[in-house]
Amino acid sequence: MKITDLLVKETMIMNLQAVSKEAAIDELIASLAASGRINDPVLFKKKILEREAQSSTGIGGGIAMPHAKTRAVNEPTVVFAKSAAGVDFASLDEEPAKLFFMIAAPEGAGNMHMRTLAALSRLLIESDFIEALMNAGTPDEVVALFDAKQAEAEAKAKAEEAANAGGTKQETPGRVIVGNPASQSFVVAVTACPTGIAHTFMAEDALKKKAKEMGVNIRVETNGSEGAQNVLTADEIARASGVIIAADKNVEMARFAGKPVLQRPVSDGIRKPEELITKAVKGEAPIYRSEGRGGDEAPAVKSGSIGSRIYKDLMNGISHMLPFVVGGGILLAISFLIEQVASVDNPIVKLLQTIGGGDGAFHFLIPILAGFIALSIGDRPALMPGMVGGFMALNSNAGFLGGLAAGFLAGYVVILLRKTFAGLPKTLDGLKPILLYPVFSLLITGGIMFYLFDPVFSWINEGLIDGLNHLGTGNAVLLGLILGGMMAIDMGGPFNKAAYTFAIGVFTSSGNTNGLMMAAVMAGGMVPPLAIALATTFFKHKFTETERKSGLTNYVLGLSFITEGAIPFAAADPLRVLTSCIIGSAVAGGLTQLWNLNVPAPHGGIFVAALSSNALLFILAVLIGSVISGLTLGLWKKPLKTG
């Protein structure tokens, strides 16, 4: 594919009128929309601004490359625009942008499209080519310049490949080491940007070009939208005098343990390649230790507030937990459906409930959440104590809130241990990851979980059940409100379990006939995932694309009385989600008692509604509670940051 297949002449703007960054973005998007290259300008702009919020795509040198990859794009397109006066685009060099390349990539963009965009990015670091584009007067001239430049670049690449085939031949053309074969200087680099479309490859090419000028051999791994390409080998890393990480997102760092690693934003790879290469050649960088984060090494993206770093660590746990929630929850829902036409002893029902339920996928929810929160904070040594802490929280009725605490506890325990053991003799470095960190991190994390969380949450659980027993003789509606609300407080923790245990106790002591309390807890437990589903459906602009997709599965989970579907959302935004859900769940639970509803079944959700004393009123109670919670959350939650 040629670059000019993406540079559509009809979309080019040869005299951009905008005088501000947002106005420039709007003008470029309007050109895309007018040509039918995008189907949802609002969504596309939101994605563009989300990328700008991470770091400006005004790369300096008078160039801006705003870009997004989204379902709002019909066809991959690059909008070229020129501004004679220039626009303040918050560029990295603080100079106005005069050349604009707005990249619109569809979600399913094939490899050929992404390679073409990468080729375009690489051309934009050559000053003579930029000057020629500035002087171009018509779209035809722009197309001719790109055609000629691409032909020149392809011929040059073939010549270099042939020249390299003799001395520094590698497994693939992309693995050729650039530089001077006679030079002893050798460095390796990784480039990566959040979207992986433009900056990744511009940084790669800038580093290669400068290394060749300096006579330094270099190998560059790119972490673009297609994943890691030209991955560095262990031998190359071992031979390198230094490592350059020019990245605005996390990359696999453990392989660089013991090497001088220079970690910078991807923009430095584009604008400061000589400085980075010089420091890497001289080994002027902190030695990276993979045992944890802190001290003399840091994650690839160190900037940001404490809150943003906590949120990133939290989302790492949630994203790894989510497949267990969805997979296990859907299988459980199917088992409940089959159970209505078969029986509890049906082998298919047993199989699905074993795989998806407490003995299968759901058994791992809290340990996975805790483990990967810890991993994000303390690297690989924190994964094991984090998962064990999460498992202890699960067994001690601490629920997902206890799991959150366990994850952060384990991560920071590992960081503390790393600082504590920093003064040990170098001869003991090999013992740290295989002996010292596993033993002490597990002991400290497990000890705190055992002596603090277990007794505290057990005391809370017993106290709640005792209180509910005394309340049971009082006002039924008040009891329904409390039971319903408790189901949403911690979604599996002591409050949830106390309410459910109380309802089960009443149900079993009556010979499985008095399901009044079961109606309250079942309605209350169905509300949170249904509320999440409604909020993500009707307030789309306040949720990410991943959250919206996950929200759809919550319709099924909520109808099936699987409250855990709401856990990822509650963990990410506990104040708004939990408060909203508690309100709706309490209302639903109270309505079941107001209407004297009886559900003689311990689980099943909508699938056992027919067993209720009034199925329509039970469904109405759940619906009212879900709408209240969904509206509360949707109105309360802040829109996604767009700039």
Image: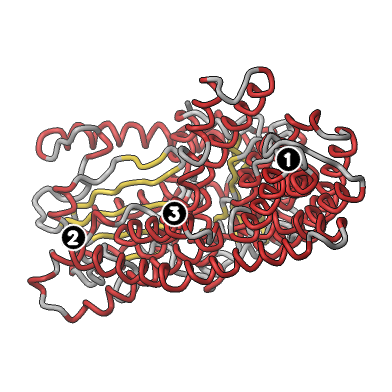
Give the image quarter of residue 241. Answer: bottom left
Q: Dots 1 and 3: beta carbons under 8 Å?
A: no
C-alpha separation, residue under disc 2 versus residue under disc 1:
58 Å
The answer to whether residue 27 of the structure is visible from this angle is no
Where residue 556 sits in the image (x, y, percent)? 69, 34
Quarter holding the C terminus is bottom right
- Mark 2 neighbour class, 10 Å CA radius: few under 14, some 14 to 19, many 20 or more: few
The answer to whether residue 73 of the structure is visible from this angle is yes
Query: Which element type, helix, strand or loop, lies under badge 3?
Result: helix
C-alpha separation, residue under disc 2 versus residue under disc 3:
51 Å
Above-or-below relation of 265 to 585: below
Q: Residue at x 10, y 39 (%)?
A: 167
Above-or-below relation of 466 to 31: below
Where residue 418 sits in the image (x, y, percent)? 27, 73
Among numbered discs 2 and 1, the one appearing first in the sequence:
1
Residue type for callout 2: Ile
What residue sits right under mark 3 in the picture? 127
The residue lying toward the viewer, choosing from 279 and 576, is 576
Query: Which element type, helix, strand or loop, lies under badge 1?
Result: helix
What residue sits right under mark 1 in the picture? 31
Q: Nearer the viewer, mark 2 or mark 1?
A: 2
- Mark 3 neighbour class, 10 Å CA radius: few under 14, some 14 to 19, many 20 or more: few
Q: Nearer the viewer, mark 2 or mark 3?
A: 2
Position of residue 520 in the picture relative to residue 143 (left or right): right
User: Residue 434: which disc?
Assistant: 2
C-alpha separation, residue under disc 1 versus residue under disc 3:
27 Å
Among numbered discs 1 and 3, the one appearing first in the sequence:
1
Q: Dots 2 and 3: beta carbons under 8 Å?
A: no
Query: Which element type, helix, strand or loop, lies under badge 2?
Result: helix
Residue type for callout 1: Ser
Q: Residue at x 39, y 71 (%)?
A: 412
Residue lying furthest right in this view? 595
